[in-house]
Image (cartoon, rainbow, N blue to C red):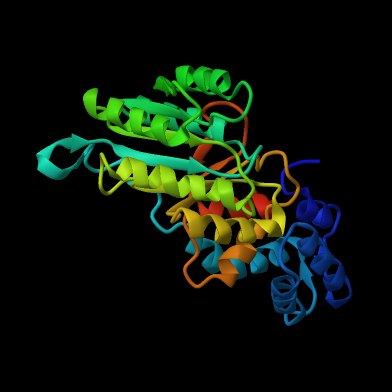
Amino acid sequence: MGIFSKISSFFTGKKELDVATAESLSDALIAADIAPDLAESLVSKLRARGTVDAAEAKQILFDAMLPIASKLQGVASPPACGGSAHKVGEGGDATPNVILIIGVNGAGKTTTIGKLAKQWTDSGKKVIVGACDTFRAAAGEQLSEWARRGGAELVCGVSNDTAATAYAAVQKGIEDNADIVILDTAGRLHNRSDLMDELSKITRVIKKIVPDAPHETLLVLDGMTGQNATAQIEHFDKSAKLTGLIITKMDSTSKGGFLISYAAREKNPLPIVSIGYGEKISDLRPFNADEYLKKLLDIS
């Protein structure tokens, strides 16, 4: 089954849609993780048109979803991707942009960090990666390999103190005149208050050396998370004020509609900084609402 096949398979072999088949389309949208009330609202636009061919039906859905999905574009990319290479700290010292990467276990944080580092080093920026995941076995080794592939220098902790490792990475970034410091963190469930408190500690510690850090706090979400993504966003935002989202593994899911549901539900949804459609180090790119919807609806 290909990407977003819950919806694309519905249209396979259909030349036209009418009121009778609209109910099945609603089920397909819900199966792709679009909230039931939104799915019904979208399908009602087709019912109002009577019988339409499949291509026209996709276009109607696309036109209805585009204003919603466009809310997710927000700021197209984090400040570290462009603009001035450094922020200026207290005393006039140049400091790097500090990017905090968080998320649950298995979301794809480590590979995402490697992909981000690759993008930024390819654009001429010096990148430091802080290995602040001191809990998961082999986390350091995996991050070391992805940092190497991304052209970044890795800073590992000398103890299990994640905040101390974060501090050391930011300090190294300042000393080496780096442009960007990316801080990896251990995967954690959003309902574990002790681990969520640790994120707050990391933030407090790095502010001692760079008062306005972190400049970006990005939540990595697995594309297969579904409607539970909203709960993750809400809980992580309380402990570490989020500035954006990164969606991974969209190539391996037949769903993906939860992004539309999230954007429709929130007045000011967090922007999607990047979205991953593959496993190669180059398979992470800026979110584009038009591209996302065409994949969702299987529009060529």
Q: Is residue 183 left or right of residue 105?
A: left
Q: Residue at x 72, y 66 (%)?
A: 57
Q: Is residue 122 left or right of residue 58?
A: left
Residue 153 figure quarter: top left
Comparing 276 with 19, the one in front is: 276
**Residue ranking furthest to the left:** 92
Q: Is residue 7 above or below residue 44?
A: above
Q: Residue at x 89, y 75 (%)?
A: 20
**Residue ranking furthest to the bottom:** 48
Residue 258 figure quarter: bottom right
Q: Is residue 184 above or below residue 272?
A: above
> Which quadrant: the N terminus?
top right
Q: Residue at x 49, y 32 (%)?
A: 113
* Number of dots carrying numbers: 0
Residue 61 in view: yes
Residue 202 figure quarter: top left
Q: Residue 225 location, x and y as percent?
A: 69, 50
Q: Residue 121 location, x and y as percent?
A: 36, 25
Q: Is residue 64 above or below residue 74?
A: below
Comparing 6 with 141, the one in front is: 141
Q: Residue 261 location, x and y as percent?
A: 64, 65
Q: Residue at x 46, y 17 (%)?
A: 148
Residue 81 in view: no
Q: Is residue 298 left or right of residue 90?
A: right
Q: Residue 213 location, x and y as percent?
A: 31, 45
